[in-house]
Image (cartoon, grey):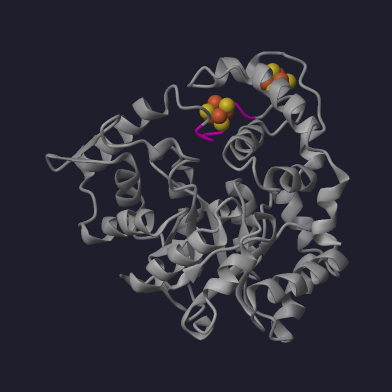
Amino acid sequence: MKFRKLGSTGLEVSRIGLGGVAFCITPKNDVKKAVDRALDLGINYFDNARLYGSENKVGGALKGRRNKVIVASKCHFRDVREVRKSLEKSLKELKTDYIDIYHIHDVKSETEFSNIAESGGLLDLYEEFKREGKIRFIGVTGHDNQALVRALKSGRIDVVMGRYNPLTRSIEDSVIPLTEKLQRGYIVISALAWGIFSVPVERYPFLISGKEVPAAIASFRFILSNPGVDVVLAGVRSGSEVEELVSALDTAPLTEEETAEVVFRSFGLGRGSGCTQCRVCMPCPEGIDIPLYYRYLTYMNEYKTSGYPALTWQAYAEPFSRACTDCGICVERCPFDLPVPRDIRMLDSMAENIRHPAYRDEYD
Ligand code: SF4
Ligand code: SF4
């Protein structure tokens, strides 16, 4: 395993961390096996979120080894009373007295961060958690670069977490230079672009230095070649998947030529694979967050046997409540020709079936 300092936190963190989202549908025993294998391989960063339902499984699997690892979790609530309750629940589920990095989950815009940073607001509460010793560092996660930039410029955030892969590279010119300048940590999510890079090598090989490698390894090698990246999260369901992704660390950074080749092949892979979250279709005149809809479609397809889609829908209710007028602007802009209005209508009708108040109990 390779390690590095995470910004100015002083934490020595493994370059590959174990992502928690897929654990929402992974049985407890399999999570334990994945955590054990990750620890054997030297991984020390364990990602969670209240929304994933991963905390109980990961907390149990880490029993007796808490002081050897960095435990992170995230809270999607914005109401200060709900956030305090949620943190207490996270601590209980993770079986720990403190969380190393506590993230404000999925900040969607600069304006949202400004509200969070207001006097008496959420960020004040997170700082109080720090003073109380319940968390050590504050993180912000999000898919909007400007929100992450705004968070970094506030000077009150230790770590940011955002997407990065050969199909989604806008952080290279915005967030990454700022994390480096301000000495803040950068953790990568969506390294496999919601499964687009999870295809088997037989179906879509990447050629690097004359050798065929799976798309997932090509993406990990691409990401790890960027010196501004601290940790890449591997969202896995088994120990063998962790092993495969960790093997990307045994290779040298990609050359310029290899990077160009990986990016070129990635666009071929992206075509016909669904939404790559590139955001080229934005802004929508009705204020609809189109990539968010597509992310949500993935949650519905991938994690439908867990409560995660329902909980996420509730957490995001406001951005989902706008009406598409079928103006077609997004369809014209999308480089992958996705039928956005049709997919939005389909998702709306799918999600209607899971608006069940019982899911609310999870947090009560
Ligand atoms: S078709 Fe719908 S989603 Fe697309 S830009 Fe128009 S209103 Fe927005
Ligand atoms: S709908 Fe198309 S343009 Fe919009 S984020 Fe997805 S892939 Fe990119």
Which residue is depicted at the point 84% across and 64% down?
Answer: 82
Q: Magenta span covers which residues?
A: 276-282
In the picture, the quarter occupied by the C terminus is: bottom right
Q: Residue 239, position in %: x, y? A: 39, 60
Which residue is depicted at the point 25% across and 34% down?
Answer: 205
The vertical placement of 212 against 154, above or below, is above
Q: Nearer the viewer, residue 180 or 186?
A: 186
In the image: residue 111, left or right of residue 337:
right
The vertical placement of 271 against 70, above or below, is above
- Residue 280: tell me if it is visible: no
Q: Residue 254, position in %: x, y? A: 23, 49
Quadrant location of residue 102?
Answer: bottom right
Which residue is depicted at the point 75% across and 49% down?
Answer: 111
For ligand 2, give the image quadrant: top right
Picture mark count = 0
Q: Residue 360, position in %: x, y? A: 84, 52
Q: Nearer the viewer, residue 273 or 165?
A: 273
In the picture, the quarter occupied by the N terminus is: bottom left
Q: Is 281 colored magenta in this rendering?
A: yes
Q: Is 41 colored magenta in this rendering?
A: no
- Residue 189: tell me if it is visible: yes
